[in-house]
């Protein structure tokens, strides 16, 4: 989607410690940001990249579109380094300083669904929400697990699948550790395998069609979701379908510019294109 970014970048200066050198870096300013499938509490969570993104942007509204904290993983193999605390503190800091945060829980953080309708300062919990864009479109916001036939199976089968996926992510971490040592860019082994398998059974297409049907039934112009770790912006007949992607495999995020245009960002590609990958990897308590 074509987007005019002339109003989104404000230059800021950061002083480096000791040497007096000044680094110039752009601050991205958006009307709205949608993040999903962060999976805090797992080794697969790309907390360093996420922290870099959160510290690089300002927005009026921040939607957390489910699977932010992975309570399934915390129940059997928790992984919670300081970087995961830093993500939570950074999000809370944005709420403290005026960003409106709407948390729409998913299946991995479904415990928070018990608090739907509650408001905690600038943070509200919703089972689903409707967002009005600057150009007058109405977008349904939901996680999307209710449309996934895999999630609607028994809990034991789902958790077994989650365990297998966790093992795949461990392999993904090893592969990319080797690639970094060789000077090669990041590549998602997990994403490649999952993408091919799901296409074989038309999984993604069926999910997208089901979500688009729900948006049509709700009488809105489009839908923002997550869940399947497959970032996308496309039209499905008369419905605008938008998927945030994830911060496990692809590090993608949906953003709304001040005029209402919506863009899909890939933060790993951004770090490479701005020669900042080594700085991101050295963020405090990166994991």
Image: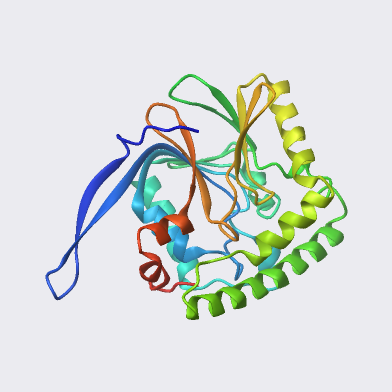
Vertical order, 151 against 205 (above or below): below
x then y, percent, for residue 211: 72, 34
Horizontal side, residue 282 vs residue 141: left or right: left
Residue at figure coordinates x 65%, y 52% from the top left: 229
Horizontal side, residue 229 vs residue 4: left or right: right
Residue at figure coordinates x 67%, y 45% from the top left: 114
Comparing 166 with 23, the one in front is: 23
Comparing 186 with 171, the one in front is: 186
x then y, percent, for residue 35: 53, 47
Vertical order, 92 against 22 (above or below): above
Comparing 69 with 197, the one in front is: 197
Comparing 52 with 77, the one in front is: 52
Horizontal side, residue 195 vs residue 282: left or right: right
Rendered image coloring scheme: rainbow
Residue at the extreme left of the image, as rendered: 20
x then y, percent, for residue 217: 73, 22
Residue at figure coordinates x 62%, y 48% from the top left: 66
Number of marks in the image?
0
Q: Quadrant of residue 242?
A: top right
x then y, percent, for residue 76: 72, 72
């Amino acid at each position: 989607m074509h987007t005019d970014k002339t109003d989104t970048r404000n230059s800021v200066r950061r002083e480096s410690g000791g040497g007096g050198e000044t680094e110039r870096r752009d601050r991205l300013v958006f009307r709205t940001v949608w993040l999903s499938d962060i999976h805090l509490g797992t080794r697969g969570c790309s907390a360093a990249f996420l922290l870099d993104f959160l510290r690089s942007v300002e927005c009026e509204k921040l939607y957390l579109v489910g699977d932010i904290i992975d309570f399934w993983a915390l129940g059997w193999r928790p992984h919670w380094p300081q970087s995961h605390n830093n993500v939570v503190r950074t999000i809370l800091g944005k709420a403290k300083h005026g960003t409106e945060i709407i948390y729409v829980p998913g299946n991995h953080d479904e415990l928070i669904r018990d608090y739907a309708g509650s408001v905690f300062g600038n943070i509200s919990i919703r089972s689903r929400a409707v967002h009005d864009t600057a150009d007058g479109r109405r977008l349904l916001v939901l996680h999307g697990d209710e449309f996934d036939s895999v999630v609607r199976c028994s809990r034991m089968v789902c958790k077994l699948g989650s365990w297998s996926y966790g093992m795949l992510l461990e392999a993904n971490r090893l592969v990319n550790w080797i690639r970094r040592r060789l000077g090669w860019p990041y590549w998602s082994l997990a994403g490649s395998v999952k993408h091919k398998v799901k296409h074989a059974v038309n999984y993604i297409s069926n999910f997208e069609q089901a979500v688009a049907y729900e948006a049509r039934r709700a009488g809105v112009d489009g839908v923002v979701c997550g869940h399947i770790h497959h970032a996308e912006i496309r039209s499905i007949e008369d419905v605008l379908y938008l998927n945030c992607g994830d911060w496990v495999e692809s590090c993608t995020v949906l953003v709304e510019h001040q005029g209402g245009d919506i863009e899909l960002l890939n933060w790993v590609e951004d770090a490479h294109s701005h020669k900042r990958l080594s700085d991101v990897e050295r963020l405090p308590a990166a994991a």
